Amino acid sequence: MFSISVILTSFNHADFLSEAIESTLNQTYKDFELIIWDDASTDNSWDIISRYQDPRIRAFRNSEQMRGIHNINKAILEVAQGDFIAIHHSDDIWELDKLEKQIDFLRANPDVGAVFTNAFIINEDGGEFQDKEHFYYSIFNQENRTRHQWLRRFFDIGNALCHPSVMIRKQCYSDCGLYRYGLGQLGDFDMWIRLCLQYEIHILPEKLIRFRIQNNEANTSGNRPDSRSRTCFETYLLLFNFLGFKKVEDLLKVFPEASKYLEESGGNMKYSLARAILDMSPQHYSTQFALHVLFDCINEPDSNVRDFFKSRDYVKMTGVLDPMRVREIEQLRQTNDINTMMEFNFRNLQMENERLSIELSNIKMSFFWKILSPFRKIKKRVSLLFRR
């Protein structure tokens, strides 16, 4: 029986995989098992994994690609023996004292569910990452907060926790649930929100992981059109986690703006949260979320919400708030139409200018233009004399 189960997800990272494995095997803390789950890699990742003979390694390989979250869940449910779970990725590197420092902290702080670390950001070749404007350059450099402060930060801004730095009590997965399927970008973020609804978390300030940024935004979370679109939609889905408050005092610690609506509604937390969100000038997806919650509130059979919030007021609200951004899209279309017209006119002017230039050139080459050339020179001289 091991104290820690390290779950290392592997997919087509043959160039980096050995560093990830060896940074685990060489940890100063030795009482762990290393579960490597290869997701049907098409490079020679499985050959690299198979070379290692350390008895702490338990290696598995999918016959078809299932994505990392599926493999992590399977490892937690069916394989992991440790009381603590550490997540590792096959393109990242751990500092050698990472596990020791994290398990010491969790044992000394039984009220904390998970401990993260800061991260040193490296480029694809393993050198120091230089792009200070990049999202990941300093995102993991975070101060510690209470779980309520983290929840508000998650709502207002988003994730700032490094998934492959986490060590979490296995019990947390039983209490909060495993990673949820269908989330391609924010599966770990979804986990942190649900975790902070029940547990405190902590970040060690040391940079105990080397987090690799691959070229051409090749990371799963890279800044690409598909990931941006998916992230926006998944953010909307994750907002429903904020309906998970069990106590009014927890709701108010995260959203104090809800207090006036709690008085109005006689303590209806769902209604109060939705109304508070609409008061906070939210993003369009949080507007959609809040209106969705209010719709459910006024349609619940045993709800008293319609006594103080009329359905006609709700209908008016959906038109004013423009949750699907119809007016914004129409304005953009009108702006685009104007820009298109201006571009069309500009192209016509360019063509007309080219036509006139060609016509003038033809005139200058003509017989009469050359014959009259001396008279134009005399006319120019006369004009200069009169100006004097």
Image (cartoon, helix red, strand yellow):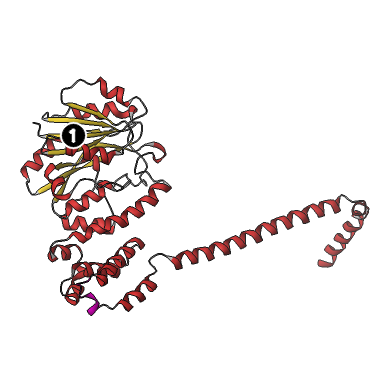
Residue at the (23%, 67%) spot, across then down: 273
Residue 144 appears in view:
no
Numbered disc total: 1
Of the 4 image quadrants, the one containing the C terminus is bottom right
- Local packing at callout 1 (Cα closer than 10 Å; few below 14, some 14-19, many 20+) is many
Q: Position of residue 204 (x, y in %)?
A: 17, 43
- Residue 171, by quadrant, is top left
Q: Position of residue 102 (x, y in %)?
A: 13, 39
Residue on which the image places disc 1: 6
Mark 1 residue element: strand
Residue at the (28%, 54%) spot, across then down: 158
Question: 347 or 32, which lies in front?
Answer: 32
Q: Position of residue 14 (x, y in %)?
A: 33, 27
Q: Position of residue 353 (x, y in %)?
A: 73, 56
343 w.r.t. 71: above or below: below
- Residue 153, by quadrant, is bottom left
- Residue 21, by quadrant, is top left
Please state if 146 lies on the left or on the right of 46 as rendered: left
100 w.r.t. 351: above or below: above
Question: 32 or 241, which lies in front?
Answer: 241
Of the 4 image quadrants, the one containing the N terminus is top left
Q: Say whether residue 263 is magenta.
A: no
Please state if 178 lies on the left or on the right of 103 as rendered: right
Residue 369 appears in view:
yes
Question: 97 or 233, which lies in front?
Answer: 233
Q: Which residues are magenta?
A: 301-308
The amino acid at mark 1 is Val
Residue at the (20%, 20%) spot, across then down: 53
161 w.r.t. 281: above or below: above
Q: Main secondary structure of the magenta part?
A: loop
